[in-house]
Image: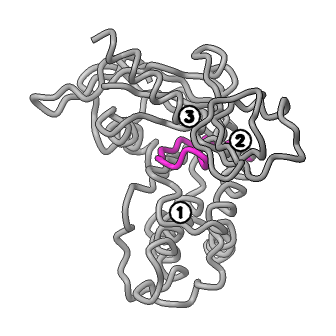
Amino acid sequence: MRNLHKSFPPRKVLRGVSVRLYEGEIVGLLGLNGAGKTTFIKLLAGLLVPEEGQINLLGRPLNPATVRTAVALMKEGQPSFSEFLTPRQCLLYYGHLLGIGNLETRVDQALEMADLRQFAERPLLELSFGTKRKTGLALAYLKGARLLLLDEASAGLDVKSVANLRSALRRYAQAGNTVLLTGHEMGFMEAVCDRVILLHEGRVKADGRLHELGKKYALQQFIEVWYEGEPLVGEVLEQENGLFRLKLDLHELGLLDGRRVRQVKLQQSVLEHLLQEVDRVEGRMA
Protein backbone atom coordinates (compact mmCIF):
# COMPACT_ATOMS: atom_id res chain seq x y z
CA MET A 1 0.00 0.00 0.00
CA ARG A 2 1.60 3.25 -1.14
CA ASN A 3 0.53 6.76 -0.17
CA LEU A 4 -3.14 5.90 0.35
CA HIS A 5 -5.58 8.79 0.80
CA LYS A 6 -9.29 8.45 1.50
CA SER A 7 -11.87 11.06 2.51
CA PHE A 8 -15.51 11.09 3.53
CA PRO A 9 -16.09 14.85 3.20
CA PRO A 10 -15.53 16.93 5.11
CA ARG A 11 -13.29 14.47 6.97
CA LYS A 12 -9.96 13.15 5.69
CA VAL A 13 -9.77 9.57 6.99
CA LEU A 14 -6.44 8.31 5.58
CA ARG A 15 -3.58 10.71 4.93
CA GLY A 16 -0.77 9.11 2.94
CA VAL A 17 -0.66 5.61 4.44
CA SER A 18 2.15 3.37 3.18
CA VAL A 19 2.45 -0.19 4.52
CA ARG A 20 3.99 -3.46 3.33
CA LEU A 21 2.69 -6.89 4.39
CA TYR A 22 4.66 -10.13 4.05
CA GLU A 23 3.84 -13.79 3.53
CA GLY A 24 3.48 -15.87 6.67
CA GLU A 25 2.90 -13.06 9.16
CA ILE A 26 0.02 -11.97 11.38
CA VAL A 27 -0.23 -8.20 11.60
CA GLY A 28 -2.30 -6.23 14.09
CA LEU A 29 -3.82 -2.93 12.96
CA LEU A 30 -4.34 -0.73 16.00
CA GLY A 31 -5.64 2.75 16.70
CA LEU A 32 -8.20 4.68 18.67
CA ASN A 33 -11.76 4.99 17.33
CA GLY A 34 -11.72 7.11 14.18
CA ALA A 35 -8.07 6.37 13.37
CA GLY A 36 -8.99 4.88 9.97
CA LYS A 37 -8.67 1.14 10.66
CA THR A 38 -11.95 0.00 9.11
CA THR A 39 -11.47 2.26 6.07
CA PHE A 40 -8.00 0.76 5.60
CA ILE A 41 -9.43 -2.78 5.77
CA LYS A 42 -12.17 -1.93 3.24
CA LEU A 43 -9.60 -0.54 0.79
CA LEU A 44 -7.67 -3.81 0.91
CA ALA A 45 -10.90 -5.75 0.42
CA GLY A 46 -11.80 -3.70 -2.67
CA LEU A 47 -14.93 -2.28 -1.03
CA LEU A 48 -13.54 1.25 -1.28
CA VAL A 49 -11.24 2.91 -3.81
CA PRO A 50 -8.47 5.28 -2.69
CA GLU A 51 -8.46 8.85 -4.01
CA GLU A 52 -4.68 8.70 -4.23
CA GLY A 53 -2.11 5.92 -3.94
CA GLN A 54 -1.86 2.32 -5.07
CA ILE A 55 -2.44 -1.14 -3.65
CA ASN A 56 -0.53 -4.12 -5.07
CA LEU A 57 -1.24 -7.72 -4.13
CA LEU A 58 1.02 -10.59 -5.20
CA GLY A 59 2.88 -8.21 -7.50
CA ARG A 60 -0.19 -6.90 -9.32
CA PRO A 61 -2.49 -3.90 -8.83
CA LEU A 62 -5.51 -4.77 -6.71
CA ASN A 63 -8.62 -5.39 -8.86
CA PRO A 64 -11.95 -7.22 -8.46
CA ALA A 65 -10.63 -10.47 -9.95
CA THR A 66 -7.64 -10.51 -7.55
CA VAL A 67 -9.89 -9.74 -4.58
CA ARG A 68 -12.26 -12.56 -5.52
CA THR A 69 -9.51 -15.18 -5.57
CA ALA A 70 -6.93 -13.92 -3.07
CA VAL A 71 -8.68 -11.86 -0.35
CA ALA A 72 -11.14 -12.87 2.38
CA LEU A 73 -12.83 -10.44 4.74
CA MET A 74 -14.73 -10.88 7.97
CA LYS A 75 -16.25 -7.54 8.95
CA GLU A 76 -17.09 -6.37 12.43
CA GLY A 77 -20.49 -7.44 13.77
CA GLN A 78 -22.78 -10.35 13.02
CA PRO A 79 -22.37 -11.99 9.59
CA SER A 80 -25.47 -11.58 7.41
CA PHE A 81 -26.24 -15.25 6.75
CA SER A 82 -29.71 -16.70 6.47
CA GLU A 83 -30.44 -17.85 10.01
CA PHE A 84 -32.45 -20.83 8.77
CA LEU A 85 -29.28 -22.38 7.33
CA THR A 86 -26.76 -24.39 9.30
CA PRO A 87 -23.04 -23.43 9.30
CA ARG A 88 -22.36 -26.33 6.93
CA GLN A 89 -25.12 -25.22 4.53
CA CYS A 90 -23.80 -21.64 4.59
CA LEU A 91 -20.32 -22.81 3.60
CA LEU A 92 -21.64 -25.12 0.88
CA TYR A 93 -23.80 -22.31 -0.55
CA TYR A 94 -21.02 -19.74 -0.73
CA GLY A 95 -18.52 -22.37 -1.82
CA HIS A 96 -20.67 -23.14 -4.86
CA LEU A 97 -20.96 -19.43 -5.67
CA LEU A 98 -17.17 -19.09 -5.50
CA GLY A 99 -16.62 -22.18 -7.64
CA ILE A 100 -14.47 -23.92 -5.01
CA GLY A 101 -13.42 -27.45 -5.97
CA ASN A 102 -13.40 -30.49 -3.66
CA LEU A 103 -16.00 -28.56 -1.71
CA GLU A 104 -17.22 -31.17 0.81
CA THR A 105 -13.66 -31.79 2.05
CA ARG A 106 -12.84 -28.08 2.12
CA VAL A 107 -16.00 -27.37 4.13
CA ASP A 108 -15.05 -30.05 6.69
CA GLN A 109 -11.59 -28.49 7.02
CA ALA A 110 -13.04 -24.99 7.45
CA LEU A 111 -15.49 -26.16 10.12
CA GLU A 112 -12.64 -27.86 11.97
CA MET A 113 -10.39 -24.80 11.67
CA ALA A 114 -13.08 -22.52 13.14
CA ASP A 115 -14.01 -24.99 15.93
CA LEU A 116 -17.54 -25.42 14.56
CA ARG A 117 -17.91 -29.17 14.19
CA GLN A 118 -20.32 -29.57 17.12
CA PHE A 119 -22.59 -26.82 15.72
CA ALA A 120 -22.29 -27.65 12.03
CA GLU A 121 -25.80 -29.12 11.65
CA ARG A 122 -27.74 -26.67 13.82
CA PRO A 123 -29.59 -23.65 12.32
CA LEU A 124 -27.85 -20.35 12.97
CA LEU A 125 -31.12 -19.16 14.52
CA GLU A 126 -30.29 -21.35 17.53
CA LEU A 127 -26.65 -20.34 17.86
CA SER A 128 -24.90 -17.61 19.81
CA PHE A 129 -23.43 -14.40 18.38
CA GLY A 130 -19.92 -15.79 18.83
CA THR A 131 -20.77 -18.98 16.95
CA LYS A 132 -22.22 -16.97 14.06
CA ARG A 133 -18.96 -14.99 13.97
CA LYS A 134 -17.06 -18.27 13.78
CA THR A 135 -19.20 -19.23 10.78
CA GLY A 136 -17.99 -16.06 9.08
CA LEU A 137 -14.44 -16.99 10.00
CA ALA A 138 -14.92 -20.48 8.55
CA LEU A 139 -16.07 -18.94 5.28
CA ALA A 140 -12.87 -16.89 5.14
CA TYR A 141 -10.85 -20.09 5.65
CA LEU A 142 -12.91 -21.92 3.02
CA LYS A 143 -11.97 -19.40 0.37
CA GLY A 144 -8.28 -20.21 0.89
CA ALA A 145 -7.31 -16.56 0.44
CA ARG A 146 -3.68 -15.43 0.54
CA LEU A 147 -4.73 -12.34 2.50
CA LEU A 148 -7.18 -12.76 5.38
CA LEU A 149 -8.73 -9.56 6.79
CA LEU A 150 -10.43 -9.78 10.18
CA ASP A 151 -12.11 -6.70 11.64
CA GLU A 152 -12.57 -7.17 15.42
CA ALA A 153 -11.66 -10.83 15.04
CA SER A 154 -12.14 -11.95 18.65
CA ALA A 155 -15.34 -9.98 19.39
CA GLY A 156 -18.09 -12.14 20.89
CA LEU A 157 -15.90 -15.22 21.34
CA ASP A 158 -15.53 -17.08 24.63
CA VAL A 159 -12.16 -17.93 26.19
CA LYS A 160 -11.89 -21.36 24.57
CA SER A 161 -12.87 -20.01 21.15
CA VAL A 162 -10.30 -17.23 21.42
CA ALA A 163 -7.59 -19.79 22.16
CA ASN A 164 -8.73 -21.89 19.18
CA LEU A 165 -8.73 -18.77 17.00
CA ARG A 166 -5.13 -18.01 17.93
CA SER A 167 -4.06 -21.53 16.95
CA ALA A 168 -6.05 -21.42 13.71
CA LEU A 169 -4.58 -18.06 12.65
CA ARG A 170 -1.07 -19.32 13.38
CA ARG A 171 -1.64 -22.39 11.18
CA TYR A 172 -3.09 -20.18 8.45
CA ALA A 173 -0.01 -17.92 8.47
CA GLN A 174 2.43 -20.82 8.63
CA ALA A 175 0.94 -22.08 5.36
CA GLY A 176 2.39 -18.95 3.69
CA ASN A 177 -0.67 -16.71 3.95
CA THR A 178 -0.98 -13.26 5.53
CA VAL A 179 -3.43 -12.20 8.23
CA LEU A 180 -4.31 -8.57 8.98
CA LEU A 181 -6.62 -8.06 11.94
CA THR A 182 -8.01 -5.31 14.12
CA GLY A 183 -9.14 -5.59 17.71
CA HIS A 184 -9.55 -3.79 21.01
CA GLU A 185 -8.61 -6.75 23.21
CA MET A 186 -4.94 -5.97 23.68
CA GLY A 187 -4.08 -9.24 25.41
CA PHE A 188 -5.31 -11.20 22.38
CA MET A 189 -3.51 -8.89 19.95
CA GLU A 190 -0.22 -9.18 21.85
CA ALA A 191 -0.49 -12.96 21.94
CA VAL A 192 -1.27 -13.51 18.25
CA CYS A 193 0.44 -10.72 16.26
CA ASP A 194 3.95 -10.91 14.81
CA ARG A 195 3.90 -7.22 13.99
CA VAL A 196 1.82 -4.17 14.88
CA ILE A 197 0.82 -1.14 12.78
CA LEU A 198 -0.59 1.83 14.69
CA LEU A 199 -2.78 4.38 12.92
CA HIS A 200 -3.38 7.79 14.45
CA GLU A 201 -5.71 10.26 12.72
CA GLY A 202 -5.18 8.61 9.35
CA ARG A 203 -1.39 8.29 9.49
CA VAL A 204 0.97 5.44 10.38
CA LYS A 205 2.63 6.37 13.66
CA ALA A 206 4.24 3.04 14.55
CA ASP A 207 5.10 -0.11 12.60
CA GLY A 208 7.19 -2.96 13.95
CA ARG A 209 7.46 -6.01 16.15
CA LEU A 210 6.35 -5.61 19.72
CA HIS A 211 9.84 -5.76 21.24
CA GLU A 212 11.09 -3.20 18.69
CA LEU A 213 8.28 -0.79 19.54
CA GLY A 214 8.87 -1.40 23.24
CA LYS A 215 12.45 -0.21 22.90
CA LYS A 216 11.57 2.71 20.62
CA TYR A 217 8.88 4.11 22.91
CA ALA A 218 10.47 2.93 26.19
CA LEU A 219 7.31 0.97 26.97
CA GLN A 220 6.92 -0.67 30.35
CA GLN A 221 4.63 -3.51 31.32
CA PHE A 222 3.19 -2.63 34.72
CA ILE A 223 1.81 -5.15 37.19
CA GLU A 224 -0.03 -4.91 40.49
CA VAL A 225 1.11 -6.95 43.48
CA TRP A 226 -0.34 -7.46 46.96
CA TYR A 227 2.69 -7.77 49.23
CA GLU A 228 2.93 -8.69 52.92
CA GLY A 229 5.00 -6.09 54.75
CA GLU A 230 6.45 -2.79 53.64
CA PRO A 231 8.25 -3.17 50.27
CA LEU A 232 11.52 -1.59 49.13
CA VAL A 233 10.50 -1.15 45.48
CA GLY A 234 7.42 -0.09 43.54
CA GLU A 235 4.73 2.53 44.02
CA VAL A 236 2.33 1.93 46.91
CA LEU A 237 -1.27 2.30 45.72
CA GLU A 238 -3.10 1.03 48.79
CA GLN A 239 -2.46 -0.38 52.27
CA GLU A 240 -4.73 -2.71 54.20
CA ASN A 241 -4.05 -4.87 57.30
CA GLY A 242 -0.32 -5.13 56.72
CA LEU A 243 -0.71 -5.78 52.97
CA PHE A 244 0.49 -3.28 50.38
CA ARG A 245 -0.90 -3.00 46.85
CA LEU A 246 2.02 -2.02 44.61
CA LYS A 247 2.47 -0.81 41.05
CA LEU A 248 5.66 -2.34 39.64
CA ASP A 249 7.55 -2.51 36.41
CA LEU A 250 7.73 -6.16 35.40
CA HIS A 251 11.46 -6.51 36.13
CA GLU A 252 10.97 -5.19 39.70
CA LEU A 253 8.95 -8.26 40.66
CA GLY A 254 12.20 -10.20 41.00
CA LEU A 255 13.40 -7.73 43.64
CA LEU A 256 10.62 -8.70 46.05
CA ASP A 257 10.68 -11.59 48.49
CA GLY A 258 8.59 -14.17 46.63
CA ARG A 259 7.34 -15.68 49.89
CA ARG A 260 5.54 -12.42 50.71
CA VAL A 261 3.85 -11.94 47.34
CA ARG A 262 0.16 -12.70 47.77
CA GLN A 263 -1.34 -11.79 44.39
CA VAL A 264 -0.03 -10.64 41.00
CA LYS A 265 -2.16 -8.93 38.37
CA LEU A 266 -1.23 -7.47 34.98
CA GLN A 267 -2.17 -3.80 35.15
CA GLN A 268 -1.59 -2.66 31.59
CA SER A 269 -0.56 -4.37 28.38
CA VAL A 270 2.33 -3.11 26.30
CA LEU A 271 -0.06 -2.28 23.44
CA GLU A 272 -2.33 -0.25 25.70
CA HIS A 273 0.72 1.67 26.84
CA LEU A 274 1.76 2.15 23.20
CA LEU A 275 -1.64 3.58 22.25
CA GLN A 276 -1.59 5.96 25.18
CA GLU A 277 1.99 7.04 24.55
CA VAL A 278 1.43 7.81 20.86
CA ASP A 279 -1.82 9.64 21.66
CA ARG A 280 -0.02 11.67 24.34
CA VAL A 281 2.88 12.57 22.03
CA GLU A 282 0.61 13.49 19.12
CA GLY A 283 -1.68 15.52 21.36
CA ARG A 284 1.28 17.44 22.72
CA MET A 285 2.59 18.16 19.22
CA ALA A 286 -0.84 19.38 18.13
Assess whether residue 252 is covered by the magenta stretch. no
Q: Is residue 209 above or below residue 102?
A: above
Q: Name the residue under label 1.
A: 137
* Res 271 label: 3
Give the mark, 1 or 2, whose residue is nearer the N terminus. Answer: 1
Residue 180 rendering spot, x and y as whole percentages: 53, 41
Mark 1 and mark 2: span between their CA atoms?
Answer: 18 Å
Classed neighbour count for the residue bearing mark 1: other residues with Cα under 10 Å, few (<14), some (14–19), many (≥20): many
Secondary structure of the residue carrying tag 2 is loop
**Residue appearing at x 64%, y 43% in the figure:** 245
Classed neighbour count for the residue bearing mark 3: other residues with Cα under 10 Å, few (<14), some (14–19), many (≥20): many
Assess whether residue 184 is covered by the magenta stretch. yes
Q: What stretch is highlighted in magenta?
A: 175-189
**CB under 8 Å between discs 1 and 3:** no
Q: Is residue 256 left or right of residue 247?
A: right
Displayed quadrant of residue 51: top left
Give the mark, 1 or 3, whose residue is nearer the N terminus. Answer: 1
Secondary structure of the residue carrying tag 1 is helix
- Assign the N terminus to one quadrant of the image: top left
Nearest the viewer among 241 and 164 is 241
- Assign the C terminus to one quadrant of the image: top left
Q: Which amino acid does label 3 sit on?
A: Leu
Q: Is residue 123 above or below residue 130?
A: below
Q: Which of marks 1 and 3 is in front?
A: 3
**Residue appearing at x 47%, y 44% in the figure:** 182
Q: In this view, does 8 lie to the left or right of 13?
A: left
**Residue appearing at x 52%, y 27% in the figure:** 274
Give the mark, 3 or 2, whose residue is nearer the N terminus. Answer: 2
**CB under 8 Å between discs 3 and 2:** no
Q: Mark 2 points at which residue?
A: 176
Classed neighbour count for the residue bearing mark 2: other residues with Cα under 10 Å, few (<14), some (14–19), many (≥20): few
